[in-house]
Amino acid sequence: MSTCSKEHRYWDGFKNLPDDQGGFGRHKCAGCAYEAGYKAGLNREEKISINLDELPVSQAGTIRHKSPHAAFAEGYRAGVEKSYEVSQ
């Protein structure tokens, strides 16, 4: 299982995500989940899902114990919003 070393582990915006210390999302990188959601939102994918098996682990910085599910959803929303700016 890979470990995330990307800078997004320290983004301040993740401080407001809910904590998730149990279940299958435990220790998965919320930053990578956000980026996956953002990409899906930017493409306005209509059938969205998150594959937690594909996410690296991380317990560093502001994403420590944060929900990858909530991070994915936030990323998707931000990506959809950005897609309207790009398409204009």
Image: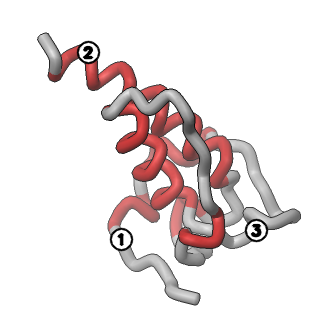
Residue at 69%, 52% in the rendered image: 67
Percent position (x, y) of residue 18?
73, 44
Work out whether 22 lies above or below 86.
Answer: below
Real-space Cα separation, disc 2 to disc 1, in angstroms: 27 Å
Q: How is the image coloured?
A: secondary structure
The quarter of the picture where residue 63 lies is: bottom right
The amino acid beneath tag 1 is: Lys
Give 28 or 18, whichever is nearer the viewer. 28
The amino acid beneath tag 2 is: Tyr
Give 2 or 18, whichever is nearer the viewer. 2
Count residues near mark 2 (Cα–Cα under 10 Å), then give few for <14, some for 14-19, many for 20+: few
Residue at 60%, 52% in the rendered image: 50
Residue at disc 1, secondary structure: loop
Q: Select label 2 or label 1 by which is in front.
A: 2
Give 46 or 57, whichever is nearer the viewer. 46
Number of the label disc, if any, that sits on residue 39: none
Give 87 or 75, whichever is nearer the viewer. 87
Residue at 59%, 77% in the rendered image: 57
Real-space Cα separation, disc 3 to disc 2, in angstroms: 33 Å
Mark 3 or mark 2, earlier in chain: 3
Mark 1 or mark 3, earlier in chain: 1
Number of the label disc, if any, that sits on residue 84: 2
- Which residue is at the far right? 22
Q: Which residue is mark 1?
A: 6
Work out whether 65 lies above or below 77.
Answer: below
Percent position (x, y) of residue 14?
53, 47
Number of the label disc, if any, that sits on residue 26: 3
Which quarter shows the C terminus? top left
Percent position (x, y) of residue 53?
64, 71
The amino acid beneath tag 3 is: Arg
Mark 2 or mark 1, earlier in chain: 1
